Image (tube, grey):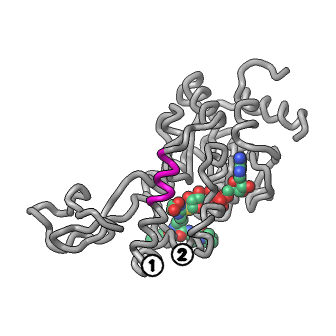
Amino acid sequence: MAQESLDEVRGWLAEAPRIAVLTGAGMSAESGIPTFRDALTGLWARFDPQQLASPEGFAADPALVWNWYASRRAGVIEARPNAGHLALADYGRRHPGRLGVVTQNVDDLHQRAGSEEVIRLHGDILEDRWFDACRRHARGANVCDPAWAERGSPPACAECGNRVRPGVVWFGEALPVAALDAAERVAQECAVMLVVGTSGAVHPAAGLACSARRAGARVVIVNPQASELDGVAHRRLQGTAAVLLPLLLAEEPLA
Ligand code: BV8
């Protein structure tokens, strides 16, 4: 990766009143969490992630999908934030209100690194919620409490048979409106958007890079590979999140 590109982007960041960072699964790759499209190894190798990460996939085989998430959940709990997460969190501490972190990821590594107000577009793999509205308003409440679920794969409500599902946004499901609105605002208001570790294949998240560009921001991709957003970017820095983000965000001049 050319040093002059790195210096040029560092100059843009130094002048930027507001910076946005849009992260994808590659952000957590150096923490040992397989990227979304690499997540299907071993037991899951023969499945399509878009099929498993969908209401239809869950309805067709709740145990298969539940177990896939359970194994991914265990990996997230084991993982530690990498130098890229820590560089973003450190920058956010040093420049309060200047950095907006928007993530497609369902892990909690940005938060565990210390980033505050992370905008989570696709939910939280560590959270449970009900697949359906509870059919019998168990125990007088409007919805079942996952704590009432009987153990199983997936856990199910002992009273109405409702099943527990992971608190993530599946394909075909709408993103949380508040998160998407907040992310659009961050994209519109930033002077530079760093697009880190995403193939740009998933919408409407990938569209945030186009929103930033249209609003006049400089868009910079950090990725070892080509992505579907390369055509939107002013610069592509070929490298990984844990190596390039600390260099891009360091206050002191690079050696
Ligand atoms: C919706 C949670 C409407 C689950 C996920 C417009 C155009 C085309 C299609 C659509 C469109 N609008 C909607 C769609 C349909 C669909 C979609 O986008 N389909 C695509 C795939 C064709 N979108 C939806 O269904 C969305 N919903 O639009 O709803 C609606 C409205 C109203 C009412 C009802 C419905 C919902 C999409 C959310 C899906 N859920 N995650 C889970 O995780 O199990 S998305 C999933 O993919 C992950 O969150 C992941 O983060 C995300 C995106 O993938 P990436 O993050 O980019 O990961 P990927 O593996 O692809 O790439 C990794 C990258 O990292 C690579 O580029 C690699 O080179 C790089 N990398 C690797 N190592 C490193 C690295 N980079 C840096 N450092 C490294 N070390």
Question: Residue flagged by tag 2: what amino acid is it?
Answer: Gln
Rendered view: 189 above or below 203:
above
Magenta residues?
70-77
> In the image, what residue type sits under mark 1?
Glu
Q: Where is residue 206 in the image (x, y as percent from the top left)?
A: 64, 59
Callout 1: CB less than 8 Å from ligand 1: no
Q: Which mark is residue 51?
A: 2
Q: Looking at the picture, does residue 255 appear above or below residue 39?
A: above
Drawn side of residue 45 relative to residue 230, left or right: left
Residue 211 visible to an observer of this rendering: yes
- Sequence order check, earlier mark of 1 and 2: 2
- The residue at the point 48 percent across, 67 percent down is 170
Residue 56, numbered circle: 1
Task: Tell whether 246 sits left or right of 155.
Answer: right
Q: How crowded is mark 1: few (under 14 residues within 10 Å), some or many (20 or more)?
A: some
Circle 1 SS class: helix
